[in-house]
Amino acid sequence: MLSLAALSLRLGAAGCRGGRRSMATVISGNKTSKLVRERLKKEVEKMKSQFSGFRPGLVVLQVGDRDDSNLYISTKLKAAAEIGISANHVRLPNTATEDEVLQSIASVNQNPAVHGLIVQLPLDSVKPIDTERVTNAVAPDKDVDGLTCINAGKLSRGDLGDCLIPCTPNGCMELIRQTGVSVAGKHAVVIGRSKIVGAPMHDLLLWSHATVTTCHSKTPDLPAQVGRADILVVGAGKAEMVRGEWVKEGAVVIDCGINHIPDETKASGKRVVGDVHYASANQRAGYITPVPGGVGPMTVAMLMENTVQSAWRFLQKSQAGR
Ligand code: NDP
């Protein structure tokens, strides 16, 4: 008997049903992230009862007062509160110097009640601050954004059990798992090579045993590369750049893009689209993530996952040290 995933892929390979191509199966990040958050809530309850009221601790460090950052931070704090994670927002003024930011990080690094620390990027400072230096100052075992060189290095070597993985690509992997399509042996194509999306996505797919091609702004003939992808992950920051005609029939398409384009039919005068042209890709893909409601909600869920995972490791170490 064929599984739903296998059946869907077969139909995708056939390309049509009754002469008309069926639409892709939509992979819902809203539903998947809800499941992850519910599981984490139970884990935190278990921690609390097993370790006399213990709660995972998260700190979000912000420099300045960007509106978009404020919105992202409030989403993270709300998700943490719902799960039972003790989350604190530390805000430094936009006049903070690099040394002051580093001092703040050092103090959170030393606080045993905090198991996860994220520095909200981009930094909104009037002073020159080296973002790379700041991200690397976070203790690797509290680096729940997975952005330190230590965690990135472990991931690139395939030490997945011993590192914190960046949240967006980790969320993409969870969405790919939801399809039931096995990654091993597939040809995966990643568009983008940033530290936060493309590069770690490449590593995760590689160590899940896909053969991976990573494309960037200098890659010639992007449509031909995309056409070879059984699994396509796009994080380019270019509205609707990947056209449906490029996509291989039956492919798994994961769209990380968040782009605002003008739309006069909306009260705000704009709407959010991904890096993939959804309407046309939906006609060829086997599975596809929507924007919004795809990768976005998974990023926050994976941040919570990393925080809980980091707290478990802390507890294990404390128990071992007794
Ligand atoms: P960056 O701008 O840091 O990186 C974009 C990457 O795409 C670069 O590697 C760039 O290549 C590549 N690229 C740009 N244009 C092209 C092109 N025409 N052809 C091929 N490659 C191209 O962006 P991020 O990685 O931070 O973000 C990517 C997207 O994901 C954005 O839309 C962002 O909003 C979204 N995002 C979504 C998140 C979520 O939670 N859903 C979280 C983080 C990001 P090169 O290296 O050569 O410049």
Image: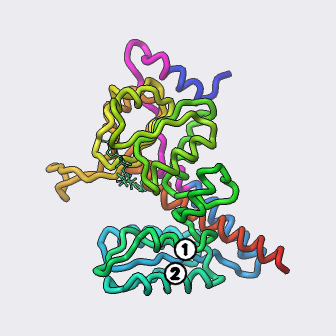
Whether 256 is drawn above or below 222: the answer is below
**Mark 1 element type:** loop
Residue type beneath disc 1: Val
Q: Which residue is mark 1?
A: 138
The boundaries of the magenta stretch are: 12-34
| Residue toward you, 43 or 198 | 198
Q: Are marks 2 and 1 in contact (CB under 8 Å)?
A: yes
Whether 3 is drawn above or below 84: the answer is above
Which image quarter is the N terminus in?
top right
176 left or right of 112 in image: left
Whether 13 is drawn above or below 176: the answer is above
Q: Which residue is mark 2?
A: 105
Residue that appears at 70% across and 55% down: 161
Residue type beneath disc 2: Ile
Q: Furthest-left residue in view? A: 264
Residue that appears at 57% across and 24% down: 7
Q: Residues within 10 Å of mark 2 (few under 14, many from 20)?
A: many
315 left or right of 153 in image: right
- Let me know if residue 243 appears in the view: yes
Residue that appears at 44% across and 31% down: 24
- Let me know if residue 31 appears in the view: no
x and y, in percent, of residue 215 in the image = 41, 39
Whether residue 33 is in magenta: the answer is yes
